[in-house]
Image (cartoon, rainbow, N blue to C red):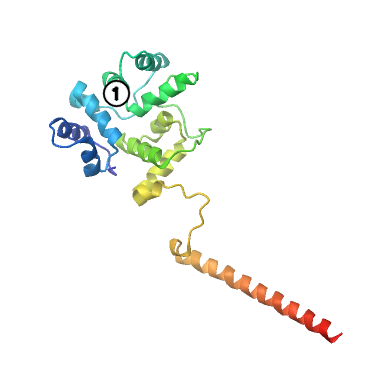
Amino acid sequence: MSKSSYTPEFRAKIAQEYLNGNCSRKDLSKKYNIPESTIRDWINVYKTHGINAFINTNGNKQYTKDFKIQCVEAVLKGESSVLDVVSQYQISSSHMLREWISLYNANRELKDYIPKREVYMADARRKTTIEERKEIVDYCINHNRDYKGTASIYNVSYSQVYSWVKKYDVQGDDGLTDRRGRHKTDEEVNELERLRRENIRLKRQLQEKDMLNELLKKVQELERM
């Protein structure tokens, strides 16, 4: 993933490289460090709409409930494939359409998508895999760091998206690893934390030594009796 936004020209260049037969999607993914699924989506919309497919697609496109149902039913009825629908209607990603299909199949309501709606206080902080976090960060960076729009599309909170992007900016893919519940080793913490830990260990050793001395005294007293 690039740490800067992907320009329309750049996305068109990637798609054209593939269409010219110069590289496979897998090769392009490795070459530019971009998820293969993202490249696949770029290629499909580019084949239909050219570079215009990438202009003014900054995550602020609205999707009505009826539009979502129309796209989902086109796939479920076998009228079109996921990739064809994404390309035809210039949906931001195939992941988004698959999410609509999952909700539809689960009999959950498909709601109008308004990019400006607040997601700062989103209730759900669903669990995500490392691959999902990579895709979410890629989408956010690729769409001018539209944290709110990205949070709405992927059903996560604004704070999650913001945190993942900032961690990625500093640490790359390593920053997206979920380290909750994992105790850092002494080598992984800064000097102040190492000193704090050493101080705690020394205090514990002194306490254990004092307890041992008290125990020896009591044993000696008992032996004198």
Q: Is 189 left, or right, of 43 in this rendering?
A: right
Q: Residue furthest bottom?
A: 224
Q: Secondary structure at mark 1?
A: helix
Q: Residue 224 or 139: which is nearer the viewer?
A: 224
Q: Residue furthest right?
A: 225
Q: Which residue: 38% across, 43% down?
A: 165
Choose top left, top right, bottom left or bottom right for residue 87.
top left
Q: Which residue: 54% across, 66% down?
A: 197
The percent position of residue 70, horizontal first and vertical second, equals: 37, 13
The percent position of residue 135, horizontal first and vertical second, equals: 35, 37
Q: Is 159 left, or right, of 54 in this rendering?
A: right
Q: Residue 183 or 200: which is nearer the viewer?
A: 183
Q: Which residue: 30% across, 16% down?
A: 80
Residue 222 vertical placement versus 28 (above, below): below
Q: Is 29 left, or right, of 59 in this rendering?
A: left
Question: Which kind of residue does numbered mark 1 sit on?
Answer: Leu
**Residue with the mark numbered 1:** 83
Residue 89 vertical placement versus 30 (above, below): above
Q: Which residue: 24% across, 25% down?
A: 45
Q: Quadrant of the N terminus?
A: top left
The percent position of residue 117, horizontal first and vertical second, equals: 44, 26
Residue 92 vertical placement versus 107 (above, below): below
Q: Residues within 10 Å of mark 1 (few under 14, many from 20)?
A: some
